[in-house]
Amino acid sequence: MSGNYGHRLEFGTLITPGNASPDTPVTLARRSEALGYDLVTFADDPDQPAHLDTWTLLAWVAGRTDRIRLAANVRTVPLRSPAMIARSAASLDLLSGGRLELALGTGDRDPDGLAAAAAPSGARLDPRAALDALGESIDVVRAVLDAGDPDPVHYDGEHHRIDGAPRGPLPAHHIPIWLGGTDPRLLRLVGAQADGWLATFDPAEPDTVRTSNKIIDEAAREAGRDPAEIRRLLNVSGRFSATRQGFLHGPAAGWVEDLLPLVVENGVGTIVLMTDDVTTMELFAREVAPALREAADRALPAPLPRTAQRGGAVRAKRRPGIAYDEVPASLTDHAVEPGDIEYARVKSNYLRGGAPGLVLRPRSTAEVADALTFARAHRHLPLGVRSGGHGISGRSTNDGGIVIDVGGINGIEVLDEDARLVRIGAGARWMDVAATLAPYGWALTSGDYGGVGVGGLATAGGVGWMARKHGLTIDHLRAVELVLADGRVVRASGTENADLFWAVRGAGANFGVVTAFEFEVDEVGPVGWAQFALDAGDPVGLLTRWGAAVEAAPRDLTSAIIMGPRRMGQPAVAQVMAMVDSDDPATIVAQLQPVADVAPGYDQQVVITSYASVMANASDAPHQAQGEPISRTGLIEHLTPEFAAAAARLLAGGVVYFFHIRSIGGAVTDVDPDAMAWSHRNVNFHVTAFGWDRARLDALWDGLLAEHLRGTYLSFETDQRPERLAEAFPPRTLARLRTLKKRYDPDGLFRDNFAITPDTASRTTP
């Protein structure tokens, strides 16, 4: 292949890692970033006593910079284990936010430019064997970096053998592997295996780049690869002067003239300036780089891309039916495809395994609108909307469809301290909300797990540890910023788009993507937090007594109970948790005592702590769920002996592994049932069961518990039968929601999370 390869034109610096003044290379790296360079590199020569260790320097520079990418130029592989190279590269990539590039080579201690690598036996390898070993090293590095594969690494090569080594950690981005050198054997390896080729330009041998490209391209085609996937990087050096005196020796215009053929005719995509002189760096960045980009765009048939392009290996994993190349420019940098390294982090949610065709990650309301424009063009595909990724009922992941992940819209801002009014982004997590509000002496009742995202919960209900004292989360909502199905951005509150505001509070998933919420929060100081392990040998008596104790308790107390099947040879145990909104020890004990007395106890813990500390119970690890959650849920006014007996039979049926009842009532009942779409204001408990088998759980639930329930809370429901919608919304509420659905989403863009169908002539049932 001749000419340009279509890569974005980038610029970097190559800085001497001298140890005489260790701050100097760091300062030059920071200056490179400030000047707009894309990449900063350091020579890696372990035999040079005057140099800092390059990998240590890269780590230090990563911590002192924010944007610029980092690489050794180049890292000598025979001196290091490829598995350790991969693990250290992944670690540094994570720490730097995805800024590491990996340039590898065999060193330059023999006439061929190939180091005499050490064989496993301790013998020295000849240059050809050294290249074979380098090729195996690339395989090992890539295998270890592929931490999205749960299986350990097995590799049986001539020079490297691995039997069951762990992968990872998973890097923050796909780390490209470049090979450095000009030996023809190495160039063929570049074409067959590498993502890029790095060399130093010698003006005395100007044809080296062209001839090297030819070898690389031929090897790539022989390996079934597109040569255009391989980036060409060139180290260059020169001097600025008023008059032209030779190659890269003269004014900036002369530099542009000298470098232009390398870009246009020889396909160099990255030019790395070798200098420790700040003035040279500045002149190149300000006068050469922009002029060279403009000159290349004029000389080529089409302008060079301004963003990085995905390689063939990534494109090969694209799912059918998605116009990947038409993703809006505002979203391309954060979009994740099945072939991207980040895919393993975003494909699944907390309880549901997924394989979406594209995950869009907008960072603003405008970008959400762009994402919905793209989704409207793909109405034939499933569409999921994700905030924290904990949705049990919602399809915040799917198979082959589109996911709009608003996790990056996570700001938390105090709007009015006197009115306790706060604005929270849909992607914020409740543990972060609690931590932000705590210094003010405030809290906002939410769910019971801090990793849950604000968006899903605050459009559905919000039953948490202060529900009986402070109501549902949606009871504190004062306004939302919402992107509608047609892309319009609207504000909804009690006085603006009031009908939409009514619908969002309880059925928000059907009407748009909320990007920001405004809440009036409560004054909440230290709280009493209790955890009891109680004897569940008499499940009927336990549930009946616990329910009665909670209903009789002051509103300060909110409680929950978790039960499971009896384990062979072990006593049946129930976990009871309770929060008391008080910092008075006597009050806390008095309110907890009736709860603790409902059954003999095995263990207990009671502390006075902050609400934020209770909510700080989530991990930052990405979700790695597999399969589909199977759950049923409902609302109930009282835990009667009849209900408790049915629940006991359900637990004994061998299908349920997690049975959870949360208390509601109290302040929740103070709100008019017609005030918002969440209408079940006369219940005291929320019941959820998770099971192993869909059909068996449905049969037991429908046959045993359904007759005792008075509605459902869709956030915990996975049964997709249409009856669930009628249970969630009373007839008058559902009829109003259908009318609004016709107005705001008549084509049903939001249809994958218990969809409400638009109103028809006489339709009042699901």
Image (cartoon, rainbow, N blue to C red):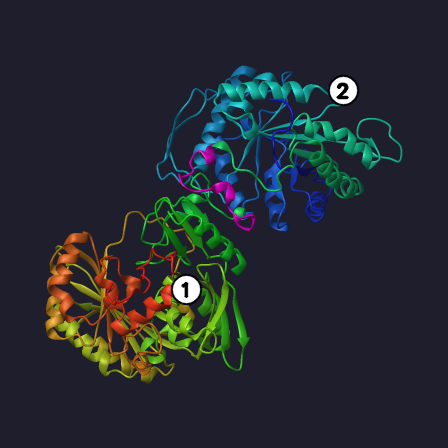
The structure residue drawn at horizontal position 19% and vertical position 75%, both measured from the top left corner, is 546
Q: Decide which of tag 2 and tag 1 comes sooner along the chain.
A: 2
Query: Which contiguous range is marked in magenta?
Result: 313-331
**What is the x, y in percent for residue 146?**
43, 37
**What is the x, y in percent for residue 451?**
40, 60
Q: Quadrant of the C terminus?
A: bottom left
**What is the x, y in percent for residue 343?**
43, 44
Q: Is residue 705 left or right of residue 85?
A: left
Q: Nearer the viewer, residue 640 or 63?
A: 640
Q: Residue furthest right?
A: 243
Q: Nearer the viewer, residue 507 or 439?
A: 507
The structure residue drawn at horizontal position 16% and vertical position 59%, both measured from the top left corner, is 565
Q: Is residue 531 above or below residue 555?
A: above
Q: Quadrant of the N terminus?
A: top right
Which residue is under mark 2? 204
Which residue is under mark 1? 744
Q: Residue 463: tell me if it is visible.
A: no
315 magenta-colored: yes
Decide: few, some or many residues near mark 1? Use Cα within 10 Å; few <14, some 14-19, many ≥20.
some
Q: Nearer the viewer, mark 2 or mark 1?
A: 1
Q: Nearer the viewer, residue 398 or 407?
A: 398
